[in-house]
Image (spheres, helix red, strand yellow):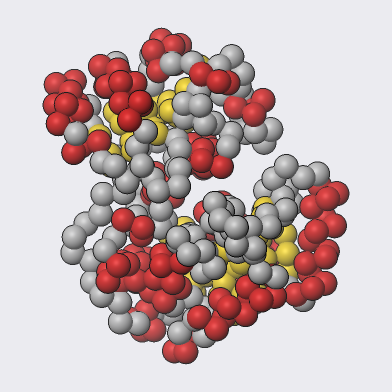
C-alpha cells in the first residue's frame, strides 16, 4: 500500500485542525511517507503550522487540482477525517473522482468503501490507480481464547476517559522511546489512522463483534513471534462511552495487557457527543482495572494527559494535581515527552 516513496496530499475539506481531522493530523505527525499538501478551502493560503503549531509548514490549498499542480510528484490522496460514525460525505465524491483522474491513488479510512462504488472503481481501473479502503476487514479472524498467556512479550494497552483524546499518539510515542532504549518494541494499530501510519494492524471497529478480541489476539501473537519485547496497543473509544465501549472491551480482553496507560484530555467534562459527565480519574481507573480478565489482571501504571490548547504552565499544574490525586506518573507526551510513562511501563 503506502511506502516511504509516496508523496501524500491530505484531503480534509472544511475540517482540518478540528477533532474530526485526527486521521490527517496523525498521518502528518507519524506517517512513513511525506505529506506535501493539505486540501481545505476554509484554510487555503495558510500552512499546517499556522493551524497546529507543532507541525511542519505544509501548504493548504482550496482544491485537489491546486495541490496536485503545486506538487506534481504527489501520488496519493489520503482522506484525512474520521467523523463520528465514519461515514463518507457524499459531496466529496466529485473531488475523489477528480483526484483519480489526476492519477492519485486513494487511501480511505472511512466505513463507506470507495471500491464498492462502481463508478469510482471503474475510474480507478481506467487510470491504473489503487483504492485502499483501510477499514475493509478480513473475514477469517479467530475467536479469542487467551492464547497470549503462552507468550512472554510485555503488552501495554492505551485506554481512555473518552474517545478521540490521543491514545494512538501516546502508543506511538512510547514505542518510539522504547526503541531508542534498545527494546525490540512494536506499535500495534487498531484503527484506520494507525494502520495508515504503520502499514499493519486491524480495523477493530469494522470487525464482526464475535471476532474483535480474536483479531487483536492474533495481531499480538504475530508480534510475539517476531520476538518483540514489548508491544504498545493503540486503544479505541472508552469503556464509559455507550457508543464505543464495545471495541474498548474487546481490546481489553483480547490483548490481555500486563499494564494500562490511561489517556485523558484536560478540560473535557462530558463524553464526546453526549451529556454524560466523565467520572473522576480514580473512578475510571477502578472501572478499567476491574474490567480486566482475572487470568491477567492489569493495573493502570500511568496517565497520559492531552493538554492541547493549554500552556505548558497550565499543563504542569494539571499534571501535579492528577499525580497527587492518583499517586501515578502523569505526563503529556507531546509537550514534555513520555519518559515518565515509559519508566512506569518498564517497571
Q: Is residue 264 left or right of residue 175?
A: right
Q: Nearer the viewer, residue 26 or 273?
A: 273
Residue 339 drawn at (x, y percent) = 69, 60
Q: Is residue 84 left or right of residue 50?
A: left
Residue displayed at 67% across by 36% down: 54
User: Measured along the vertical axis of the image, is residue 192 above or below residue 239?
Assistant: above
Residue 52 drawn at (x, y percent) = 65, 33
Which quadrant: the C terminus? bottom right
Residue displayed at 34% across by 37% down: 88
User: Measured along the vertical axis of the image, is residue 58 above or below residue 302?
Assistant: above
Residue displayed at 31% across by 56% down: 206
Q: Nearer the viewer, residue 174 or 309?
A: 309
Q: Quadrant of residue 178?
A: bottom right
Residue displayed at 64% across by 64% down: 278
Which quadrant: the N terminus? top left
User: Measured along the vertical axis of the image, is residue 323 above or below residue 234?
Assistant: below
Residue 27 drawn at (x, y percent) = 48, 39
Amino acid at each position: 500500500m503506502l511506502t516511504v516513496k509516496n508523496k501524500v496530499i491530505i484531503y480534509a475539506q472544511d475540517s482540518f485542525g478540528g477533532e474530526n481531522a485526527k486521521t490527517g493530523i496523525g498521518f502528518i505527525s507519524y506517517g512513513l511517507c511525506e505529506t506535501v499538501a493539505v486540501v481545505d478551502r476554509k484554510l487555503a493560503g495558510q500552512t499546517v503550522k499556522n493551524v497546529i503549531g507543532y507541525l511542519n509548514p505544509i501548504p493548504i490549498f482550496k482544491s485537489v487540482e491546486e495541490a496536485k499542480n503545486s506538487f506534481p510528484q504527489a501520488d496519493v490522496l489520503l482522506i484525512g477525517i474520521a467523523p463520528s460514525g465514519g461515514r463518507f460525505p457524499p459531496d466529496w465524491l466529485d473531488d475523489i473522482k477528480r483526484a483519480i483522474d489526476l492519477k492519485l491513488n486513494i487511501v480511505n479510512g472511512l466505513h463507506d468503501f470507495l471500491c464498492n462504488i462502481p463508478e469510482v472503481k471503474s475510474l480507478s481501473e481506467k487510470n491504473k490507480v489503487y483504492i485502499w479502503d483501510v477499514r475493509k476487514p478480513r473475514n477469517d479472524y479467530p475467536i479469542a481464547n487467551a492464547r497470549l498467556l503462552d507468550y512472554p512479550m510485555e503488552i501495554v494497552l492505551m485506554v481512555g476517559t473518552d474517545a478521540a483524546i490521543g491514545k494512538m499518539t501516546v502508543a506511538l510515542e512510547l514505542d518510539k522511546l522504547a526503541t531508542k532504549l534498545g527494546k525490540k518494541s512494536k506499535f500495534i494499530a487498531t484503527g484506520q489512522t494507525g494502520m495508515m501510519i504503520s502499514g499493519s494492524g486491524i480495523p477493530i471497529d469494522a470487525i464482526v463483534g464475535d471476532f474483535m478480541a480474536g483479531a487483536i489476539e492474533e495481531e499480538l501473537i504475530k508480534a510475539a513471534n517476531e520476538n518483540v519485547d514489548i508491544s504498545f496497543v493503540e486503544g479505541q473509544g472508552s469503556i464509559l462511552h455507550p457508543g464505543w465501549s464495545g471495541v474498548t472491551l474487546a481490546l481489553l480482553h483480547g490483548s490481555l495487557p500486563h499494564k494500562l496507560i490511561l489517556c485523558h484530555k484536560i478540560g473535557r467534562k462530558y463524553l464526546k457527543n453526549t451529556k454524560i459527565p466523565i467520572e473522576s480519574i480514580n473512578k475510571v481507573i477502578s472501572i478499567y482495572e476491574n474490567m480486566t480478565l482475572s487470568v491477567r489482571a492489569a493495573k493502570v501504571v500511568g496517565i497520559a494527559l492531552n493538554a492541547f490548547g493549554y500552556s505548558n504552565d497550565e499543563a504542569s499544574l494539571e499534571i501535579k494535581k492528577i499525580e497527587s490525586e492518583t499517586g501515578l506518573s502523569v505526563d503529556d507526551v507531546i509537550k514534555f515527552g513520555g519518559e515518565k510513562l515509559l519508566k512506569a511501563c518498564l517497571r
